[in-house]
């Protein structure tokens, strides 16, 4: 039923994957699917913001997040799962949608944060945006 399962994670927030990862692993084993672990590097290149960062910041940030994502996979994803790490730039929900299209994922498994912050009231939670804009099935794990 599923062949490519995508799992968005925020490496700084365990709540973004602690419940969703076991669900994604079970689905990968059930359907013999590959797992695509996605993290989003926030876009800082807007002229007003980007001017405060050193010129080589993007390269260093990508290198650091690549290492962190590989370490995350090594620690949390068993060897019997075919896995790919993916890093995208942008806002979290837009990056998740973009990655899903690029990977041709047929299921996105993601956590729903129960912590409500002010930004959630203004923009809405990322999971809600993904559910509304994704062209594939989205499983929200609570």
Image: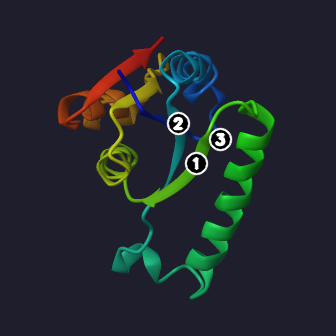
**Which one is in front, 86 or 78?**
78
- Residue placed under numbered mark 1 in the picture: 84
Which is nearer the N-term, disc 3 or disc 1? 3
Q: Dot 1 surroundings within 10 Å: few (below 14), some, or many (20 or more)?
A: few
Quarter of the image where one finds residue 15:
top right
Residue 65, quarter of the rendered image = bottom right
Do the residues under discs 1 and 2 have CB atoms within 8 angstroms?
Answer: yes
Marks 1 and 2, how far apart at CA: 8 Å
Q: Are marks 3 and 1 in contact (CB under 8 Å)?
A: no
Q: Give coordinates of residue 57: x percent, y percent.
A: 60, 78
Quarter containing the N terminus: top left
77 horizontally vs 96: left or right: right
- Mark 3 burial class by Cα count in 10 Å: few <14, some 14-19, many 20+: few
- Residue at left offset 51%, top offset 18%: 27
Label 2 belongs to which residue? Answer: 34
x then y, percent, for residue 118: 39, 32
Residue tagged by mark 3?
A: 12
Q: How many marks?
A: 3
Residue 3's place in the image compared with 48, above or below, is above
As displayed, is residue 135 above or below residue 115? below
Residue at 47% from the left image edge and 21% from the top image edge: 113
Proximity of marks 2 and 3: CB atoms separated by less than 8 Å:
no
Q: Secondary structure at mark 1?
A: strand
| Side of 96 where 141 appears, left or right | right
Label 2 packing within 10 angstroms: few (<14), some (14-19), many (20+): many
| Rendered location of residue 122, percent (x, y) | 27, 35
Name the one closer to the observer, 31 or 15: 31
- Secondary-structure class at tag 3: loop
Question: Is 33 drawn above or below residue 112 in the view shown?
Answer: below
- The residue at the point 56 percent across, 79 percent down is 53
């Amino acid at each position: 039923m599923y062949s490519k399962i995508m799992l968005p994670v925020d490496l700084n927030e365990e709540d973004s994957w602690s419940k969703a990862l076991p669900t994604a692993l079970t689905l990968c084993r059930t359907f013999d699917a590959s797992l695509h672990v996605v993290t989003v590097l926030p876009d800082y290149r807007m002229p007003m913001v980007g001017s405060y960062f050193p010129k080589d910041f993007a390269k260093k940030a990508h290198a650091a997040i690549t290492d962190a994502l590989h370490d995350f996979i090594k620690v949390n994803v068993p060897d019997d799962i075919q896995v790919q790490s993916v890093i995208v730039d942008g806002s979290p929900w837009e990056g998740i949608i973009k990655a899903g299209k690029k990977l041709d994922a047929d299921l996105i498994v993601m956590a729903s944060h129960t912590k409500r912050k002010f930004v959630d009231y203004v923009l809405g939670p990322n999971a809600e945006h993904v559910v509304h804009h994704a062209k594939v099935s989205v499983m929200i794990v609570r």
